Image (cartoon, rainbow, N blue to C red):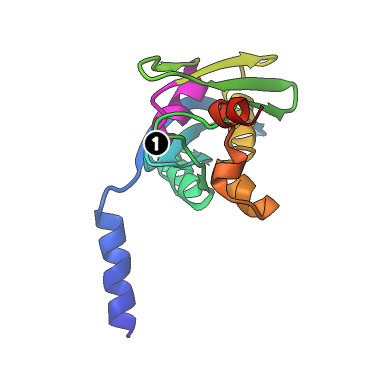
Amino acid sequence: MARQDNRRGRDRDETPEFADRLVAINRVSKTVKGGKRFGIAALVVVGDQKGRVGFGKGKAKEVPEAIRKATEQAKRQMIRVPLREGRTLHHDIEGRHGAGRVVMRSAVPGTGIIAGGPMRAVFEMLGLQDVVAKSIGTQNPYNMIRATIDGLRKENSPRMVAQRRGKKVADILHKPETEAAEA
């Protein structure tokens, strides 16, 4: 039985199911008695481009080790986001973290990803193809990503809303033709 678990873990590591994007890398220093000690801080976004995304940060003395730590943390903190037609958001969302605020809006096919730096990385790793987003209040990549993830956690699909209300999906979706026929 232990052999099967080991084989399963090895298969999971070999398959590149997740794509990752390095968003920010920063050289940090700590002043000590003998001078300064330098380290590297990395911010990475990981996703399967089918509705799952996560971010992580890692610190180490060397760049590759910091990126590896950040990637591992991102894989542990992944969230699932429902997408409309696998390409855009179901509704407009606002996410907040600290002074940072991001506004994300669904878009028609062909719009593309209209978003700045760190938010663009999150949307690409998530698998969004059409979205319009604006960051307000901060340019710090850490806070922008946290605000984006906060907004994506609030995303609800019609199926989720219908289940919560105990109704059918057709009852939740707005159909103007049926209302005009009833009136």
| Residue 154 visible in the displayed image | yes
Q: Position of residue 2 (x, y in %)?
A: 33, 82
Residue 72 placement, left or right of 159: left
Q: Is residue 121 magenta?
A: yes
Q: Position of residue 4 (x, y in %)?
A: 29, 78
Identify the residue shown where x is 45% and y is 28%: 88
Location of mark 1 (residue): 86
Spot the residue most to the right.
99
Identify the residue shown where x is 37% and y is 37%: 20
Q: Residues within 10 Å of mark 1 (few under 14, many from 20)?
A: some
Which range of residues does the magenta coloring cover?
Answer: 116-130
Spot the residue most to the bottom.
1
| Residue 36 visible in the displayed image | no
Identify the residue shown where x is 64% and y is 29%: 147
Number of numbered markers:
1
- Which SS type dominates the magenta stretch? helix
Q: Is residue 182 above or below residue 116?
A: below
The N terminus: image quadrant: bottom left
The C terminus: image quadrant: top right
Q: Is residue 129 magenta?
A: yes
Q: Regarding mark 1 in the picture, which secondary structure is present there?
A: loop
Q: Position of residue 128 (x, y in %)?
A: 42, 29
Identify the residue shown where x is 58% and y is 22%: 104
Residue 164 placement, left or right of 176: right
Q: Is residue 8 above or below residue 169?
A: below
Residue flagged by tag 1: what amino acid is it?
Gly
Q: Position of residue 148 (x, y in %)?
A: 59, 29
* Nearer to the camera, 127 or 172: 172
